[in-house]
Image: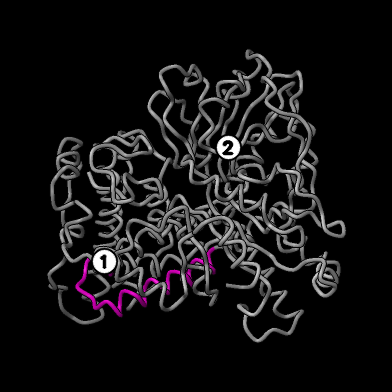
Amino acid sequence: MFCFQCQETAKNQGCTIKGVCGKPEKTADIQDLLVEVCKGISVYGSRLKEINSVDKKFGHFICQALFVTITNVAWDDPAIIRMIKQGLKLREEIKDIFKAIYKNKFGKDFLEELPDCAKWYSDDTSEIIAKAESEPMRITASGDEDVQSLRQLLIIGCKGIAAYADHAAILGQQRREIYDFIMEGLASTTKELSVDQMTSLVLKAGETAVTTMALLDQAHTANYGHPELTEVNLGVRKNPGILISGHDLKDMEELLKQAEKEEVDVYTHGEMLPANYYPAFKKYKNLVGNYGGSWWQQNREFESFNGPVVLTTNCLIPVKKENSYLNRLFTTGVVSYPGATSIPNRTKDGAKDFSKVIELAKTCKPPEELESGTLVGGFAHNQVIALADKVVEAVKSGAIKRFIVMAGCDGRQRTRSYFTEIAENLPKDAVILTAGCAKYRYNKLSLGTIGGIPRVLDAGQCNDSYSLAVIALKLKEVFGAKDINDLPISFDLAWYEQKAVAVFLALLSLGIKGIRLGPTLPAFLSPNVAKVLVDKFDIKPIGTVDQDIAAMMVGK
């Protein structure tokens, strides 16, 4: 095993025995093989798109498969192996399509030598496991440190893009160019390319991430309206409840509809908090509010909730021996966990069936109250732009001196208290723009308002980091700035998993410089690759609270 795709990887070098996340070696190896299968499909898909269009089903499968390999998503080996088998069949299908079109176009068979990922095949589970455990599957097999770093940066960025593309596809929004790039990127990692060529692909991944997040934003707002300023309840009621976590708003919608006529309440958790901001969900009287905080606290919070818990995407962490909620844990979509109940995917014209969840909820005690009161959110781009006059007036009057973008992920490490301390110690004329679960480090602090504008503006989920870029570009237009980096905005980002890497690359593609990234820089960045990012984009590791606040307030 070798895995260094998340921020908490062992010693900031790599997990080699068991993941810090809890991922066993066998599961890690099987997930690596699934990535190889995606590369094999991509080898044929990237060649096919040069002479013909590629059916979207291949790109969508790759997105789902890559999503499975994101940290804290899939834990059930048989479920991952089933996806490997499905992927191998799709690879054979796209291979046959490509070779037939190639022969028809050029009048000869395609005879070029192909990498192992495009040739190896088995439908036997034991052979698949043996292949997964073989040494050539290791991430470190490439040898050269910088080549390995750039390949992994590209693959990890593609994983984040894939997750957002899958969400958009679920809501009926797909773009062929997104799938085409992911296949191009994955296929490139099977070739010997120059550092410049690989760097160019990494930057193109950033551009594709922007396109994908914009598509998902369009999918969300077309279906559920634009997020709006909302007070979210943090307390509980006396009815039995269902807790839903993750990012999938369609799952949220279908659960609310099916539970609407039952005496069962629905609470959001973790990354599902922003669902409370969408107008379409406010009509459901059984949507109570948000329960608990960030993903890493779920062992305690799922336990005290007492009712069934539905995981629609990451982050799902291992159930501890002392926990008793496994029999009321439900997974769906790309998520899996041994012993949890899996909710089958929806049929083409139907909805997922949450009846088992609802029936179980009726037999459970109401949740234990963890806290009370409310928090305010819903400051995605449409809402902030609606407040543009107030914001501009506050900036021009000096009431707002600086915007600090503190988006991204939360995590377990104690060093993440840095982000809470930054929020607590920022001058009173600074406003925090946030998205993603990083907000749980400071969104319940009493930081006050500036001219009626809350000092923490929560745009929503991690994919809603796109909203923060839209807001920045709008401010650039309003203030007539020549460069986005001339605005009174500083970036102090937290990262944990691969979607945050896609967001980071997206911001780089928009020309944003001077980003602070922490609590550590990614382990998959070699010294030379890190130096390129520092030299070209002025990327900075986080420092001390006082030093970073002083620097950010003057735009450094």
Left or right position of 438 against 233 = left
Residue at 40% of width from left, 69% of height from top? 180
Quarter of the image that includes the N terminus? top left
Q: Is residue 206 magenta-colored? A: yes
Give the residues drawn in magenta, as a range.
188-212
Residue under pointer 1? 189
Mark 2 = which residue?
245
Q: Which is more toward the observer, 459 or 227? A: 459
Q: Residues within 10 Å of mark 2 (few under 14, many from 20)?
A: many
Instruction: Kindly tell me whether residue 287 is visible in this rendering.
Output: no
Main SS, magenta residues? helix
Q: Please name the residue shown 15% across and 59% down the image.
A: 116
Three-letter amino acid code of the residue under disc 2: Ser
Visible residue check, residue 519: yes
Residue 162 within the magenta-colored segment of the rendering: no
What distance separates the C-alpha of mark 1 from that of mark 2? Answer: 34 Å
Label 1's element? loop
In the image, what residue type sits under mark 1?
Thr
**Is 185 drawn above or below residue 23 in the view shown?**
below
Q: Position of residue 459 (x, y in %)?
A: 68, 55
